[in-house]
Amino acid sequence: MALPLSYTFRNLWARKVTTALTAGGMALVVFVFATVLMLEEGLRKTLVETGSYDNAVVIRRSSQTEVQSGVDRTQAGIVETQPEIAMGGAGERQVSKESVVLVNLNKRETNAPSNVMVRGVSPAGIALRPQVRMIEGRMFRAGSSEIVTGKSIAERFHGAGFGETLRFGARDWTVVGVFDSGKSGFDSEVWGDADQLMQSFRRPVFSSVIFKLADIGAFDAVKTRLESDQRLTVEVKRETAFYAEQSQMLANFIKYLGLTLSIIFSIGAVIGAMITMYASVASRTSEIGTLRALGFRKRSILGAFLFEAVLLGVVGGALGIFMATFMQLFTISTMNWQSFSELAFSFTLNGGIVAKAAIFSLLMGVIGGFLPSVRAAQLNIVDALRTT
């Protein structure tokens, strides 16, 4: 004979304060767990969505980032002639030879310096990033000392807003526009004319060559040809894969550190749930003896107490996930360990994270309630009824 569910709900309600404290502790642990996963997902999403699957990136062989890479003009010219490259509406090749450098800018709020990525692009390079749209001002003019800044840079750094002036590379640069790239990594960049930036920084080589594939299935062919060409020392990657690699080191650090903290906190939450359930068993010993005398079996007692612990985990998990949803309203910035530049990204919640957090909370409830439930089920009927 099984105990009705109302029995469990009534007992939880009878100990409102203890129930609330235990569920609250679990909620905080689930909140930390979900927030860590959201942080990792937000970082990955920001960088992966920076690239397009039909774009390819050519950098110097063994370079981890564009900042470390160098592709000379001769090699860039060879890459530019590949037959797999898409053609634009005016018959021009969809290729952008780009230069990437790091400059030091001061943040608006703290005046602390931080590295910011400056990207020299060509008109074709702008066309290769359809997710980029101007939200203020206009795009820079080729051959000029004009720049445009990503939304995150414009908001966070002195001199990076529309109409302001930045000084780097021994030259003053006028910010003529601010762009939004849909929360991708480009929001944390400054863009200008590639030739002007190379002259200003006295760079004789490009950092990378970006091109759009006429047929996305032709990537392997052009990759094999370019990487086996004896005149070249380059490697070719899909743009999405290239930016995914940029997030790997920082994402793994966040993941492992966060999971370690979550495990430590969860041990405390499980112990709290266990203490709560043991106290519940101790205070209801005579009640358990009465239930056993009325014919309720040990497994029914075990099931009722275990369900009570699981319910605490469910309530705590739901509350923790609910609190974590508000983290999506915040954007944080940190240094990308691959490129050593400022990167802004948001917390991202998806169905997979919700499912993992829910399972995590259930496990805390089961682990915390199992031993006390076994204790309740094994109580001797006579001894339990003698307890006052």
Image (tube, rainbow, N blue to C red):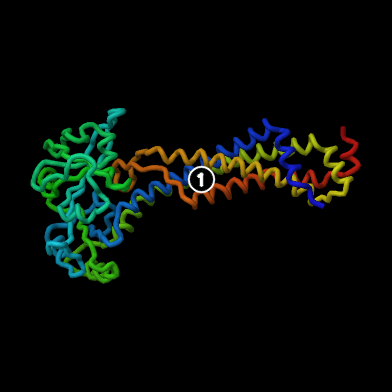
Q: Is residue 64 rendered to the left or right of residue 384?
A: left
350 vs 300, left or right, is left
Q: Position of residue 2 (x, y in %)?
A: 79, 51
* Residue ID at (23%, 35%): 105
Residue 64 location, quadrant: bottom left
Residue at the left extreme of this rendering: 143
Which residue is nearer to you in this view: 174 or 230? 174
**Viewer-closest of 163 and 270:** 163
**Left or right: 269 with respect to 5?**
left
Pointer 1 residue: 259
* Relative to 82, 251 lies left or right: right
Residue 277 in the image: x percent, y percent?
Answer: 72, 39
Q: Is residue 340 visible?
A: yes
Q: Which residue is depicted at the point 14% across and 49% down?
A: 194
Please name the amino acid that badge 1 sits on: Leu
Across and down, in percent, residue 121 comes to: 17, 50
Q: Quadrant of the C terminus?
A: top right
